[in-house]
Image: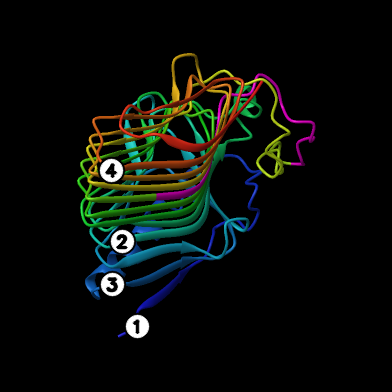
Amino acid sequence: MKKFEMVYPTHLDRYLEIPWTAEYDSSDRIQKALDRMGKRGGGLVMLARGGYFITKTLTVPKNVTLSGMDREGTLLFVRDKDGDKWNVIECESFATVRDLRIRIEGRHATVIKGKDNLTVSCVSVIASPYLKSYVCYGLGLDGAHMITAEGGKVLISDFYYFGKGHGIEITGADSVLVEDLRANSPEAALTVRNCKTAVARGLLLMGKSEKCTPDEPDEDGIIRNYMKDTKAAVKMTAACVCVFDNCKNVDLSDIDVRDARAGVAGVTVKGADSVRIRNVYTEAVEHSVKTENCKDVKIEGVTVVRGEGVCSPDAKASDVITLY
């Protein structure tokens, strides 16, 4: 039985410079392919290069992968539902979403909502070029999340987004791995609660820019190089936090947090039995690392620029460098 199905766009222009009409809506065609693959017990639904209008929730069945050809070539352009909160992609157990670029016209959508054993890889969420006020400042998502997941093993890798609102929230998982996360203007970039083992590495979390980087937007109004040079961003104002709450084992490394709101710690760990934190760089945050009610804490390799250092009554930190 075939475990692979290809879906082609109704319009090959991935920048979607066409009027929004029902004939270009790809929601039903993609969902039918996902449903067929779910009935076969799992498999791959591949979206060919091009642009896809999405106006309805896409449900990814158990053991099914929804994938683009690559993140630069396959674009989901999502129209919001008149202010109602909704989920763009809902994943059942053991579902995977990968190699997609998602643009949202609106402010109320949770981009990916997963159940247990969710995998998200090589996905970006950016502002729609049609939202002129958000091209430079990031996409506003009121009370919604980029990703939510719970239970089992959760893997999120090579994910980045520009946006106000909540970032990634994971609860009740046996193991969590988040790597290569890049976020601009989050309210809470990464929140992990009540998990057994949580590992995060390679995080770049930045506040909200008051103006663009020196790079000029390309033909579709998006600044492609925004996250390539971490020193290119200018004055930031929004909250940038990374929180691990009531997780038994926490292992964090290579974390860069810049320009958080006053009173916000770059990395916060609460109620953990074992904590390992290495190679943290923070700029303009209240505290680089903060731990509360933790056991067996080891912190090393922290660099602080324009902010406080480590606030950890649970352990002494080593190799802390403070620059002003």
Mark 2 or mark 3: which is in front?
2
Q: Assign the N terminus to one quadrant of the image.
A: bottom left
Which type of secondary structure does the marked residue at label 2 adopt?
A: loop
Mark 1 or mark 2: which is in front?
2
Amino acid at the residue labelled 4: Asp
The first of marks 1 and 4 along the sequence is 1
Which type of secondary structure does the marked residue at label 3 adopt?
A: loop
The answer for how far apart the CA atoms under marks 2 and 4 are is 35 Å
Q: Please name the residue shown 72% across and 27% down the image.
A: 212
The answer for how far apart the CA atoms under marks 1 and 3 are is 10 Å
Amino acid at the residue labelled 2: Ala
| CB within 8 Å, label 2 to label 3 | no
Q: Residue 177: give x, y in percent of width and height.
A: 37, 54
Mark 3 or mark 4: which is in front?
4
Q: Which residues are magenta?
A: 200-219
Report the residue marked by disc 3.
42
The answer for how far apart the CA atoms under marks 1 and 2 are is 18 Å
Q: Assign the C terminus to one quadrant of the image.
A: top right
Report the residue marked by disc 1.
2
Report the residue marked by disc 4.
296
The answer for how far apart the CA atoms under marks 3 and 4 are is 42 Å
Report the residue marked by disc 2.
95
| CB within 8 Å, label 1 to label 2 | no
Q: Residue 260: give x, y in percent of width and height.
A: 52, 22
The first of marks 2 and 3 along the sequence is 3
